[in-house]
Image (cartoon, grey):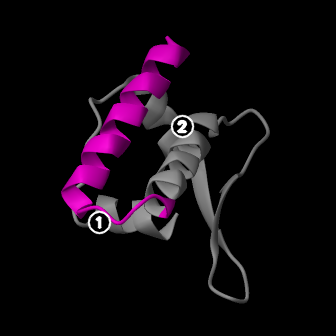
């Protein structure tokens, strides 16, 4: 989640403005533990964050692959995001 947060703050993560993903992103609350790990949480049960969790998991998988340049990671993340959005439609 730290990597995704960094991409967002650097304005290097862009999605196509999908309203469902935007809604899910607005439902995410960051929870930090004693070791400064960040976890996505939701404040209410009816809030959905599944798409964001899937995005974080995809980013983690990408980061575990052979070292690649960051712009290639972002392209891959955006492709995964597109697949997630297509699935949600």
Give the magenta-colored segment's residue range: 64-89
Asked if residue 33 lies left or right of residue 57, the reply is right
Residue at the farthest top position = 89
Q: Where is residue 53 in the image (x, y as percent from the top left)?
A: 60, 45
From the viewer's side, name the closer residue of 60 and 46. 60
The Cα atoms of the two marked residues, 2 and 1, are separated by 18 Å
Judging by the rendered image, the residue that carries numbered circle 1 is 9
- Residue shown at the point (58%, 40%) measured from the top left: 54
Q: Can residue 67 be seen in this view?
A: yes
Residue 8's place in the image compared with 19, above or below, is: below
Q: Residue 63 carries which label?
A: none
- The disc, 2 or 1, on the residue closer to the chain's N-terminal end is 1
The answer to whether residue 66 is left or right of residue 14 is right
Query: Secondary structure under badge 2?
Result: helix
Instruction: Find residue 44 and report its horizontal and vertical position in percent.
Output: 75, 44
Which x, y percent locates residue 4? 42, 60
Quadrant of residue 49 within the rendered picture: top right
Task: Give the overall secondary structure of the magenta segment.
Answer: helix
> What residue does disc 2 label?
24
């Amino acid at each position: 989640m730290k990597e995704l947060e960094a991409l967002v703050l650097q304005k290097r993560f862009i999605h196509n403005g999908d309203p469902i993903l935007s809604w899910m992103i607005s439902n995410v609350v960051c929870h930090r533990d004693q070791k400064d790990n960040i976890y996505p949480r939701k404040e209410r049960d009816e809030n959905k964050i599944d798409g964001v969790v899937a995005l974080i998991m995809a980013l983690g998988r990408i980061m575990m692959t052979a070292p690649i340049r960051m712009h290639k990671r972002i392209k891959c993340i955006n492709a995964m995001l597109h697949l997630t959005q297509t699935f949600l439609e």
